Amino acid sequence: MQGASREAYAAARAQLDGLTDAGALATASAEILAVAGLLNAEPRLRRAVSDPARSGEERSALLTGLLSGKIGAVAQDLLATLVGGRWSSASDLRDGVERLGVEALIVSADRAGDLGEVEDELFRFGQIVAGDPGLAATIGDSSKPAAARETIASQLLEGKAKPATVRLAQEAVRGFGGRSFSGALTRLVELAAEERSRSVAYVTVAEPLSDADEERLGAALAQRYGREVALKVIVDPNVLGGVRVRVGSDLYDGTVFRRLSDVRASLAAK
């Protein structure tokens, strides 16, 4: 989002932060995401409700008039605030509605005390899919109907994960934010962590870390970044040994595989 769009989104997000009813937020999330789908499918409507020639009040009235009686008061109020802001482009508004729906669900899980579990379940689901090339290819194939791929994700998670996890996994299948399935799932894990004021550290090792090692690594990263860090451990025998840690754009690679690669590169250069 560009500057003006970020300000418009921040106003709606501030309103969302003031809501406490987990059930009402979950319902509002589903309704807002349905509106995001409508805006994606209807370019003329998308342009109309982001038209800078109209006042914010006019744009809000246009959308709420269209949706009156079809969505609840919580979703309607949040969307009215969102649409009433100044948007840099129609696509920014569409993306803002989608993100608001996702963040409403994340806040709902937080209010219910489930967000830590949801965050971990999303990460583990991503690891399960990545570990099965056939499944990864099927779920990540954007040329296939999203509904069929969402059904697969739901069947894998139903009864084994929180309802919010299932719904967020479906959003990942749909390509949240225009991303690939794996990219969308990673972003959703990060948004869940951000809601709990944490950074995410992806830790790749050849063998599982002990609880004590995880605790020490988490403490060291928290000291470095000045906030709590949620560790997401990926076991990959191909790294041979050592640890690779990625936090945002920062990468610390102390794996044996990396050191061997550096030696081979050095020898090849001679």
Image: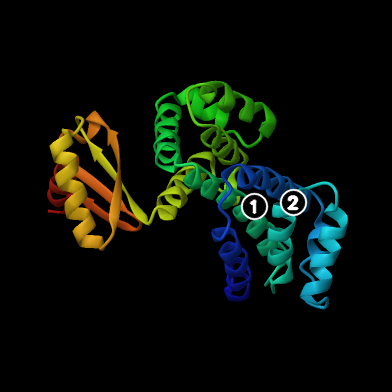
Q: Determine whether the residue tagged by mark 2 lies in a helix, strand or loop.
A: helix
Label 1: which residue? 98
| Among the 4 quarters of the image, the one containing residue 62 | bottom right
Q: Is residue 254 visible?
A: no
N-terminal label among 1 and 2: 2
For label 1, the crowd category at 10 Å Cα-Cα, with few meaning under 14, some 14 to 19 and many 20 or more, is many
Look at 12% across and 53% down and name the residue there: 270
| Among the 4 quarters of the image, the one containing residue 11 | bottom right
Q: Residue furthest front?
A: 21
Q: CA distance from mark 1 to mark 2?
A: 10 Å
Look at 16% across and 49% down and name the residue there: 262
The x and y percentages for residue 219 are: 18, 51
Question: Which of 237/44 is in front?
Answer: 44
For label 2, the crowd category at 10 Å Cα-Cα, with few meaning under 14, some 14 to 19 and many 20 or more, is some
The x and y percentages for residue 147 are: 69, 30
Q: Are marks 1 and 2 in contact (CB under 8 Å)?
A: yes
> Against 93, is 2 above or below?
below
Question: Which of 110/207 is in front?
Answer: 110
Look at 44% across and 54% down and name the residue there: 195
Left or right: residue 211 versus residue 249 is: left
Question: Colour scheme of this structure image?
Answer: rainbow
| Circle 1: residue type | Glu
The x and y percentages for residue 102 are: 58, 48
Label 2: which residue? 40
Figure quadrant of the N terminus: bottom right
